[in-house]
Image (spheres, helix red, strand yellow):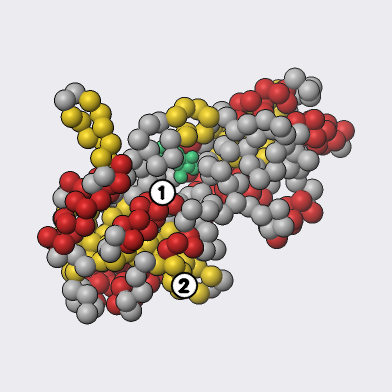
Amino acid sequence: MVKKIAVLTGGGDCPGLNAVIRAIVRTAVYHGIEVIGIRDGFKGAVENDFLSLGLQEVSGILPKGGTILGTSNRDNPFAFTVQKNGQSLQEDRSDQVIKNLENAGAEVLVVIGGDGSLNIALALSKKGLKVVGVPKTIDNDLMATDFTFGFQSAVETAQEALDKLHTTAESHHRVMVLEVMGRYAGWIALYSGIAGGADIILIPEIPYDIEKVAEAVNIRKQNGKKFSIMVVAEGAKPLGGEMVVERTIAGRTDPVKLGGIGAKAAADLERMIGLETRVTVLGHIQRGGSPNTYDRVLATRYGVAAVDAVIGGKFDTMVALKGSEIGCVPLADAVNRLKKVPLGDPVLLMAQKLGINFGQ
Ligand code: F6P
């Protein structure tokens, strides 16, 4: 029987992280298992920055955004940045992570993360560490689970923004463009666009033809609708073109920071239609704030399931949602391949039947 586990949150934060931590601690306490929290993701695992987590520490955190443990989307222990003789070098510190956990008496590491952190977890498991993953990300781009926690809250935030953009678009007879996150997948754009009544949704999975977008706006105009709402996923790209990269950041699991396609699509569109365009980039607002009801329940279910997996000896797995059931899948099935919106996705097909234009 496992007596002590460690938990960390890695990668970009998202609503529901604290709800998972709370569920893990409460379930572990119920089973008489001790929990150690690791500060700032894998950074704390390398630097031995641990704290004890009991009922007191997780009291009142269910509705709080962010993570009480802190997080980082750099600090891969297999390529850990260190300063030596005034120079920045990358070293493999994975053995240190395993040693630190051993010294602390933690037998299993629970990693709450997206594909970057779960890839690291998988690599650590290959070195003998027992790990259990919990699928986190607003992007919903993890394979082997129907939904990651945090996604629905981000969609709700984007939908609220669209509701507000609608009223000003209508008053000014403009095309309002909302650029949303999601990295290389269009899930946030697709779901928020449907929920927010968008007329056009551009996603990375369907390279767009700006002439088709202009046509859709013009048809609306001819039908008396002098405004349009367009949601653009940050990873969207024009036919034959590339994604817009805001900058690259060295030392990160994914050095590419996307951003700017909303402005490009809006400028190109404005030249082709007789209406003004305006762009809103929603950015990190999508990652902040309290988790919605769906995510509070999902995050709690994931946290309880992670401890159940530990007790059941189901190591090197990730807890996952399949339909209405939570189960465990091999960690290797969840990482290395992003879950993008399939062209036959029923929600995408439904949106097309509604007449939403995807730049085609
Ligand atoms: O993966 C979550 C996410 O918010 C993506 O949607 C986005 O592309 C990226 O992280 C932004 O990263 P950062 O917080 O480094 O700006």
Question: From the viewer's perspective, is residue 1 above or below residue 262?
Answer: below
Quadrant containing the C terminus in the rendered view: top right
Q: What percent of the width, then of the height, locates residue 110? A: 30, 62
Cα distance, mark 1 to mark 2?
22 Å
| Mark 2, secondary structure of its residue | strand
- In the visual, does 50 lie left or right of 346? left
Question: From the viewer's perspective, is residue 303 above or below residue 252?
Answer: below
> Could you tell me which residue is drawn at 60 percent across and 51 percent down?
340
Pointer 1 and pointer 2: residues touching (CB < 8 Å)?
A: no
> Could you tell me which residue is drawn at 65 percent across and 42 percent down?
203
Question: From the viewer's perspective, is residue 51 above or below residue 106?
Answer: above
Total labels: the figure holds 2
Question: From the viewer's perspective, is residue 173 above or below residue 254?
Answer: above
Circle 2 is placed at which residue position? 326
Quadrant containing the N terminus in the rendered view: bottom left
Q: What percent of the width, then of the height, locates residue 292? A: 46, 56
- In the visual, does 27 lie left or right of 359? left
Q: Identify residue type, mark 2.
A: Ile
| Mark 1, secondary structure of its residue | helix
- Tell me which image quadrant ligand 1 sits in: top left
> Could you tell me which residue is drawn at 37 percent across and 46 percent down?
11
Q: Nearer the viewer, residue 167 or 192?
A: 192
Circle 1 is placed at which residue position? 116
Q: Identify residue type, mark 1.
A: Gly
Question: Is residue 57 visible to the viewer in this orientation of the structure?
Answer: no
Label whose residue precedes the other's in the sequence (1 or 2): 1
Q: Residues within 10 Å of mark 1 (few under 14, many from 20)?
A: some
Q: Quadrant of residue 278?
A: top right
Q: Which residue appears farthest toward the right when viewing the image?
A: 222
